[in-house]
């Protein structure tokens, strides 16, 4: 059974001159021991989706439809207080920049103790140190006495992951967890998250625009475009046999994929559509090499063994 | 013909602080590199390797404690020398949006270098249009403010601004950091086009190895402020001579789930410059360190034509890789 499921979720922002549809009819599920990747470019709605999952939608955001179920409970119907409790105990988040996640004037030890105390039972220093050791901090005792600025970016991200895991969440959401790090640290954090997947028995959701991170870490992938999940598949199927033209375009223009010396890199022409005036049909049609007249009609979701594709021409 | 930029044994040391203390902390040590006309050289290494300090030293934003910098074969010395260099070289900053003043229009921003350097600008609007066209932005963009731009557009404005005075050298600090892959590809294509059109030379500072592979003719790898390997990009990537270079390449996440790395290519972090390891400074993280590495510091020595590496065993490894290569192609 899935730990976290998103059902037909639509989120819009009230902005000057109308409503901006950031997330449109998204349905996703993630189970225990599974890593779900949410991939897409800036402005495709992945961060709004992550914020909705942890109940931290900004002011001005409105959930127009749908449900987000954590172990079967619809989080959208809970009061603020209930939501806060759930957020601490059952669902935790790791952010892109771990510096902003910590209070700069308190030691790491003090903050982790406060954090663990606030969310379900005071934990002893030994347990906190144990968690730091588990995420690969070499000298946990010393780390607890330090201030956030005294740690490197990679170490801060490890501490942030330890803080999230201290509450033993069912779901860990990581928003661009390696974007601010060097490639060597990135590899180590990926390694750590992969390790945790098997040992912590929760679900992990990774939001990133980095295709390499998705390929290295995730089991299933949801590709977002203009607020919709345009393709969802197992990671191997997605990278080996992408079905949606947007997924194909994205995979083919990654400089890490293209052979050097092959001249110009492929790009995706055009821009993402205006999220305040979306077309009735396929949102990618204007940039799609396969588009034809029929693409202006509403798009059916094409489902088959373990994958779904939002494209008129997915059978083509 | 002399190189556009030539660094000879450049060192930077910062005062350690402390009243009456003369102690200085070495950040960069004996870095030599040159960038030829129209050539693209990448400087790679982790945070703390001294990449950015080197760029700052070149631009005269950081005093050097040793070595020399030459532009077109002429030594860059003092304020006048750096003024000459800043006129011939332009910098592309990492955070494109933050490098643009929020209260000025794009049109003003791209022509600002003329004002800064006191160069006559008879037709600012025409020049702004021309510069924007060069980086593929519509003329209407000139009236916009930085906050109205997307990340890719801001990066293009940064490029337009860098190109304003027709530089011969562009120093680009992480030109693709934080950009989506499709926009990264656009920026790389733009850089390649401008190089072909204007004969620009690039010194690219990055830890994005995919970028290095695509745009750099040669690569220089820094570790703790020292060059540990340099050579032609294709050769260095095909058969790295230094274990640090090999680990960086192996650590790069590959967009192919069937090629997942289950072991870690490199453990630990860059040691602090306050406590440099003895012997070879990479030995604390090196998978193949031996006793000699803990004791004796290796020199930067030639390994084949146009290549150098700072490793006691670089020659052996290169021979092994050569054999493997021969076996694979038999």
Image: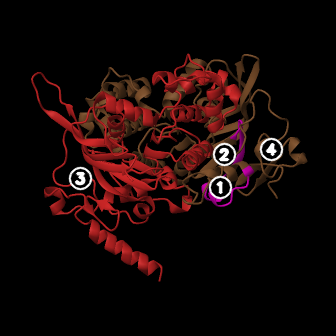
Chain colours: A brown, B red
Is disc 2 in contact with disc 1, using a CB cutoff of under 8 Å?
yes
User: What separation in Å lies between label 4 and label 3 (alpha carbons)?
Assistant: 53 Å
Q: Are marks 4 and 3 on the same chain?
A: no
Is residue A133 something that shows in the picture?
A: no
Q: Specify the farthest residue to the left.
A: B20
User: In this figure, which residue is indicated by the disc labeled 3?
Assistant: B284
Q: Residue at x 56, y 25 (%)?
A: B111
Is disc 1 in contact with disc 4, using a CB cutoff of under 8 Å?
no
Q: Are marks 1 and 3 on the same chain?
A: no
The quarter holding residue B106 reads top right
Query: Magenta segment range?
Result: A225-245
Report the front residue among A212 and B280. Answer: B280
Chain of the residue where label 3 is placed in the rendered structure = B
Image disc number at residue A285: 4
Q: Nearer the viewer, mark 1 or mark 4?
A: 4
- Tell whether B273 sits left or right of B118: left
- Circle 2 packing at 10 Å, graded few (<14), some (14-19), many (20+), is many
User: What separation in Å lies between label 2 and label 4 (alpha carbons)?
Assistant: 16 Å
Image disc number at residue A223: 2
First along the sequence among labels 2 and 4: 2
- Circle 1 packing at 10 Å, graded few (<14), some (14-19), many (20+), is many
User: In this figure, which residue is indicated by the disc labeled 1?
Assistant: A238
- Circle 3 packing at 10 Å, graded few (<14), some (14-19), many (20+), is some
């Amino acid at each position: 059974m899935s730990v976290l499921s998103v059902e037909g979720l639509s989120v819009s922002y009230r902005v000057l001159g109308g409503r901006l549809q950031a997330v449109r009819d998204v349905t996703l599920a993630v189970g225990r021991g599974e890593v779900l990747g949410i991939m897409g470019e800036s402005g495709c709605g992945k961060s709004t989706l992550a914020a909705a999952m942890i109940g931290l939608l900004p002011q001005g955001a409105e959930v127009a439809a749908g449900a987000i179920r954590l172990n079967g409970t619809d989080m959208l119907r809970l009061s603020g207080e209930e939501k806060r409790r759930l957020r601490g105990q059952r669902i935790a988040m790791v952010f892109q920049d771990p510096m902003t996640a910590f209070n700069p004037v308190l030691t790491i030890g003090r903050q982790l103790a406060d954090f663990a105390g606030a969310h379900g039972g005071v934990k002893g220093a030994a347990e906190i140190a144990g968690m730091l050791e588990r995420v690969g901090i070499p000298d946990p005792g010393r780390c607890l006495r330090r201030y956030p600025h005294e740690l490197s970016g990679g170490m801060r991200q490890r501490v942030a992951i330890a803080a999230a895991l201290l509450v033993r969440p069912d779901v860990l959401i990581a928003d661009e967890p390696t974007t601010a790090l060097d490639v060597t640290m990135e590899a180590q954090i990926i390694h750590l998250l992969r390790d945790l997947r098997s040992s912590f028995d929760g679900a992990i959701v990774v939001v990133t625009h980095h295709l390499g991170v998705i390929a290295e870490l995730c089991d299933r992938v949801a590709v977002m475009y203009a607020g919709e999940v345009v393709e969802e598949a197992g990671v191997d199927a997605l990278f080996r046999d992408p079905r949606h033209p947007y997924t194909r375009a994205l995979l083919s223009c990654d400089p890490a994929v293209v052979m050097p010396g092959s001249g110009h890199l492929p790009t995706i022409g055009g821009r993402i559509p205006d999220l305040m005036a979306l077309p009735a049909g396929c949102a990618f049609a204007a940039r799609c090499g396969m588009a034809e007249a029929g693409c202006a009609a509403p798009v059916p979701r094409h489902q088959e063994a373990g994958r779904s594709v939002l494209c008129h021409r997915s059978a083509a | 013909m002399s190189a556009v930029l030539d660094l000879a044994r450049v060192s930077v040391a910062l005062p350690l602080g402390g009243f009456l203390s003369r102690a200085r902390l070495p950040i960069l040590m004996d870095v030599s590199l040159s960038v030829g006309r129209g050539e693209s050289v990448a400087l790679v290494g982790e945070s703390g390797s001294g990449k950015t300090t080197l760029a700052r030293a070149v631009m005269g934003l950081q005093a050097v404690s040793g070595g020399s910098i030459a532009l077109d074969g002429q030594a860059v010395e003092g304020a006048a020398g750096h003024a000459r260099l800043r006129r011939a070289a332009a910098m592309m900053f990492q955070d494109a949006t933050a490098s643009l003043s929020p209260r000025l229009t794009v049109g003003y921003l791209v022509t600002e270098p003329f004002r800064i350097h006191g160069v006559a600008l008879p037709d600012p609007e025409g020049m702004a249009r021309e510069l924007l066209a060069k980086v593929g932005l519509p003329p209407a963009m000139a009236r916009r403010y930085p906050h109205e731009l997307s990340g890719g557009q801001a990066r293009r404005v940064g490029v337009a601004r860098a190109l304003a005075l027709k530089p011969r050298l562009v120093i680009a600090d992480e030109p693709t950091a934080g950009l989506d892959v499709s926009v990264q590809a656009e920026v790389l294509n733009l850089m390649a086009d401008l190089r072909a059109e204007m004969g620009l030379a690039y010194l690219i500072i990055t830890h994005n190895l995919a970028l290095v592979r695509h745009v750099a003719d040669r690569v220089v790898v820094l570790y703790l402020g020292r060059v540990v390997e340099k050579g032609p990009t294709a050769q260095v990537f095909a058969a790295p001579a230094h274990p640090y270079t090999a680990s960086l390449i192996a650590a790069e996440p590959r967009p192919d789930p069937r090629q997942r790395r289950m072991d870690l290519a490199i453990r630990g972090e860059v040691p602090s410059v306050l406590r440099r390891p003895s012997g070879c400074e990479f030995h604390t993280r090196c998978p193949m360190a031996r006793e000699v590495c803990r004791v004796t510091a290796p020199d930067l020595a030639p390994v084949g034509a146009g290549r150098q590496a700072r490793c006691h065993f670089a020659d052996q490894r290169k021979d092994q890789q050569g054999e493997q290569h021969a076996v694979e192609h038999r």
